[in-house]
Structure formats: C-alpha cells, structure tokens
Amino acid sequence: MTGFLGSGKTTLIKALLEKPAGAGTAVVVNEYGEIGIDHALLRSSSDATVLLGNGCLCCNVRSDLQETLRTLFADRARGAVPSFARVIIETSGLADPGPVLQTFATDRALGREFHLQALITVVDAVAGETNLMRMPEARKQAALADRIIVTKSDLAGAGVTERLIERIATLNPAPAAIANNGEIDPSFVLDEPPAERRDFTFGEADHTHGLESFSLIFDEPLSWPGFEQAMAVLMSLRGPDLLRVKGLVALAECRGPVVVHVVQHVAHPPVELETWPDDDRRSRLVFVTRGLGREPVARLFAGITAVATGGATASR
C-alpha cells in the first residue's frame, strides 16, 4: 500500500486490522510510529515484531525488505509468530513503489514464499490533485497502482472527489473506490480479482507533466519471440521511462491469452490464461511512460512483430 504523505494509509490499515476480515494479517512498515498502533490492540512486542490482539503482526523494516519478509516467513514456519495469511507492506509517503514491484518480479526465492497480489495507492481527495500536478512521486504512485483508494472525500466535497477520480483515470484506469471516514470495504483491499477480469484499456491519453498513458491493440495473433524481442529492445533503450506495461497477448499457439506485466526494465513472469475474458481476442497492451509517446512504441512493435507474424501491426 503506497500513497503520498498524509494520504491516510495508516488510518486505512488500522481500520482493516480491526475487522474480522483483516485477521491473520502481517503488516510491514518503516517505523512502528507511522502505523500508530492502538494500545488497546497491542498485546506484546519484541525488537522486530509487534503482536496485535486480533492475531495480526506488525513488523518493522530494519534494513532490507527482502530480508524482513524472509525472516517473517521463517518465524511463521517455526512457530515463533502466529500464522498469517497475507502481508500488507506500507511504504513511506515519498517512496517509489517500482523497486518493490521489481523485487517480487526478480527474486525467485522470495516468489516461492510470497505472491504479490496488488499495488494499492491511497490518494487524498483534498490535496490529491495538487500532489499529482506538483509531485512526481505522487504521479508515479498513481500510475503504477492496481487499485486506487480515495480518502478524505468528506472534507473535499463530491465535486472535487469526482474530478480527482477522473484525473486519475486518465493516468491509470485501475479500479477506484472512495473510503468513508477512513474505512473501505475489506474485499477491495484483501481480495484478488482473477487475472482475466483486470482492465487492460485506456481512454484518452494523458500527457500531463511528462507522463503519458496509451494503449496498443493488435488485430492478428503475435509471435511470442517477436513480442519478447520488441519488449527487450524497449526495456533496453527506455527502461527507466517505461513505468508500466500491462496487457493480454494473443498467440497463435495458445487458446487463451498471455498476461504480461513489465515495470521499467523488469518483466514479471508471463501467465497463460485458459480462456479470454470476453469476445475480443485481440492483443491489447496498456503503457504508462515518461517522455515516450505512443507513435515510437507503435513503430517499434510494428517493425519487429511484422517480421515474425507476416504483417501484424497495432490498429490503434
């Protein structure tokens, strides 16, 4: 869970931990003080871990996130801490979530112990639009999110909140929900939607402050070697500016689509689905980039995939 300073991440997490659905959750934070644990929930503590009254854990990142997670997993395995079903990682307000995503994509040992379910970004309705305009960290947090939670809508008003959600949607079409008085439906945070139900389409491209979102759609099935080559070239040349690529790829040799997910210069392992989510069987890729427009990306894919497929090009 990420979000700019003062967005309300801690309040949301506290509310989740107090609900039955939040039982069996471990929370990894930078500092205990940031989560403001209610003393009524606190049962006991050690140097590294705080045990909460509802069976949840709060773990302090001392140095390295990977090592913290491995230690937490090992402690659970040997019974040193209560069993937990999930981990919520609360990043600091100025954190770039990209390295966290890359950690789960590249660390195979960690991947055997943990599965990254979603990146959730919290946006303050009062200051959110200003932060998105002025703060690159806030824009990147919103751009990379799988889900968006808007807080403090009661203070901002309905009109301001609606405009903010529309503004975020031009940058990232991820599902968005409004938290009421610091609370959100636990299922929006804790449940994982099937991969085939995730949104892989954008509306109009957003060009604000150097970030651009756009989509490419291919009418004909692609060659996996050709697709991999195009992505490898793009990641090699413009990896730092390739904030995120998500989508479904149609391959002639597969009945279902392949889910692809790239963050900067790191590609997550592709996942082949058994069936398509709808009647549209075309490849569609969603890009969030910095200083990298649609046309050069479309030309790159057209050149490489045309060789491999005999002429497949992006239709729009």
Image: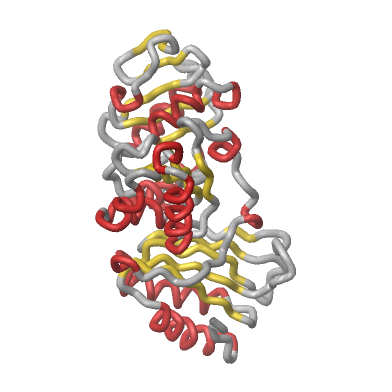
Q: Nearer the viewer, residue 131 or 297?
A: 131
Measuring 32% from the left and 51% from the top, which residue is drawn there? 138
Q: Quadrant of residue 200?
A: bottom right
Q: Is residue 207 left or right of residue 199?
A: left
Residue 162, image x, y percentages: 48, 52
Measuring 40% from the left and 32% from the top, which residue is drawn there? 70
Q: Nearer the viewer, residue 32 or 47?
A: 32
Q: Quadrant of residue 7?
A: top left
Q: Quadrant of residue 265?
A: bottom left
Residue 204, image x, y percentages: 48, 71
The vertical placement of 115 against 145, above or below, is above
Residue 163, image x, y percentages: 44, 55
Measuring 29% from the left and 37% from the top, which residue is drawn there? 64
The vertical placement of 161 against 72, above or below, is below
Q: Can residue 125 be seen in this snapshot? A: yes
Q: Can residue 267 be seen in this snapshot? A: no
The scheme the figure's colours follow is: secondary structure
Q: Quadrant of the C terminus?
A: bottom right
Q: Nearer the viewer, residue 186 or 84?
A: 186
Q: Quadrant of the N terminus?
A: top left
Q: Nearer the viewer, residue 316 or 203?
A: 203
The vertical placement of 96 against 67, above or below, is below
The vertical placement of 88 against 109, above or below, is above
Number of marks in the rendered image: 0
Residue 213, image x, y percentages: 43, 68
